[in-house]
Amino acid sequence: MEYALLQAVFLPLLLSPIAYVLGRKMGPTPAMWFTFVILLYTTVLVINAALSGTIEEHYPWTEQFGEFGFLLDGLASPFAIMIYVLSTILVLYSKPYMLHKFHEQFEEEQKINSSGGGQTSIVESSSLTNYINAKSGLYFALYLVFAMGMLGTVLSTNLIEFYIFFEVMLIPGFFLVALWGDGPRRKIGLMFLFWTHAGAVVLLLGFLMIGLTLGSFDFADIHESEIPQDVLMLSAVAISVGLGVKLAVFMFHVWLPYVHGSAPTPISALLSPAMIGIGAYGVFRLIVEFLPSTFAELSIWFHIWGLVTMIYGGAMALMQDDLKRMLAYSSISQMGYILFGIGSISVLGLSGAEMMYVTHAIGKGILFMMAGIIIVKVGTRSISKLGGLAGKMPITAVCAVVGALTIMGVPPTSGFMGEWILFFGALETAIEDGSTLRAVTFGLGLVATALTMSYMLWMLKRVFFGKTPEHLEHVKEGSWYMTAPMMVLAGFSIVVGIYPDIFLKTIIPYMNGVLGV
């Protein structure tokens, strides 16, 4: 289809005002279905384009920055597909969860208002229905812009274009956290904005060093041999640091547990599986592909950085009692796996790293949705206050087990395919190079997988099994709006686990080409 990628990126942005008006005038249900249809249509466009092979679109922009374009190839297609698949199914999940959140906030504002001496306010004079309509319209409009920013970043063909989309997705993300998060949401929203914006500025400095040296910001004009060595290493480090903040790897991870713990759960289920992994896409595209010699020098550091992140994130997850913070630290650990695979500098290691993005998107999407159902139906996020929920919420429990097995890398889930390919590549490099250091990191990486299994199994046992506390005797299963998206992802995990070539048939040839194999 002509202009398929252009439509996929910009239709959600252009139609977001309609979602806003629909929400305000007609309520959350029409706004939800409108948002769902738009994202379903654009998801079909992306999948159809991916099935057609490499698709590239270019449009005139400005002489100062170069061309504005979109590229869907073996690297970008798994990222693009998972971003829009998650965005689409989470629209349905959003309705019951956000209605629950809007009711909570309405009651909070009423209490604050009633304690203020009886003065009339907008909240007092408006009905609950009007309040919910206004909030739902804004929510779904911001949701569309957030999804659009993520996809635009992945499909960009120009450094400045990449940076613009990279920043665009931060703006709706900030408002979604600051307006409807838990706890001190405005402070946490600002933390998210400051950390990720600071990382983006460092990233931009790396882009400017490359673009101004070459006289072009287009991806097609980036040739490592034409960049001076001192500029090359400095720009590569700047890009790595900027993307490291987005990935929330060790040292730059501080913001993530707060933000993922506070954000509305549908947004947590996008931030963790989809958004932070875009940092990995940036490393693949901007370092591995465009700066291969520099990447070869830095690869061992990526490898070690990933290992430390894997172990740190896993250890911290094991200590959490808050369900969403546990999943947030798990995401840090999983980003470590991806960086670990990238640092292996082998075809299978790099392929496994990208496959880990896919499997993390599936598994963590399921688990955050599980957490949201528990928050809505039980009213607590404390793992120590839960137990025996498998009998009360069987669909949620089964999907949660599939999600946990996916994160642990147990067959026949998709996680197994990503994890074993990644570790095979790491071991292959250690043997070929005869590197004792890489052999040690490989062994320690296996230890990190034991940590992953520990916190996931411990979480499942305490939440779904054992004796049911008295206060949970009347808990019921979540609505179909919430359970159906989980079931779709759980089924997808099994399908990809059995037939991984859905993604690997595009990933491996791309990695072969990048490493010149």
Image (cartoon, rainbow, N blue to C red):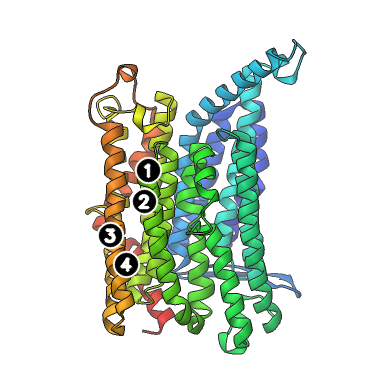
Q: Nearer the viewer, residue 296 or 49?
A: 296
Q: Amino acid at mark 2?
A: Ala
Q: Amino acid at mark 1?
A: Met
Residue 385 in picture, x, y percent from top left = 36, 27
- Nearer-N-terminus badge (1/3): 1
Question: For the residue carrying disc 4, how many other residues have a C-alpha within 10 Å: few (<14), some (14-19), or many (20+)?
Answer: many
Q: Label 4: which residue? A: 422
Say whether marks 4 and 1 touch (CB < 8 Å). no
Q: Residue at x 49, y 77 (%)?
A: 289
When asked about the image quadrant of residue 22, the answer is top right
Asked which quadrant contains residue 339, the reply is: bottom left
In depth, the one of 273 and 341 nearer the eye is: 341
- What is the number of the mark on residue 315? 2
| Circle nearer the N terminus (4, 2) | 2
Q: CA distance from mark 4 to mark 2?
A: 21 Å
Does the residue at mark 2 contact the one at mark 1 (Cβ under 8 Å)? yes
Q: Quadrant of residue 236?
A: bottom right
State how far apart marks 2 and 3 are (Cα). Answer: 11 Å
State the residue position of label 3. Answer: 447
Q: CA distance from mark 4 to mark 1?
A: 27 Å
Residue 125, position as x, y percentages in the image: 73, 15
Q: Alpha carbon of mark 3 to alpha carbon of mark 4: how far? A: 15 Å
Dot 3 or dot 4, earlier in sequence: 4
Sequence-wise, the earlier of marks 2 and 3 is: 2
Q: Nearer the viewer, mark 4 or mark 1?
A: 1
Q: Is residue 467 above or below residue 399?
A: above
Give the label on residue 140, or none: none
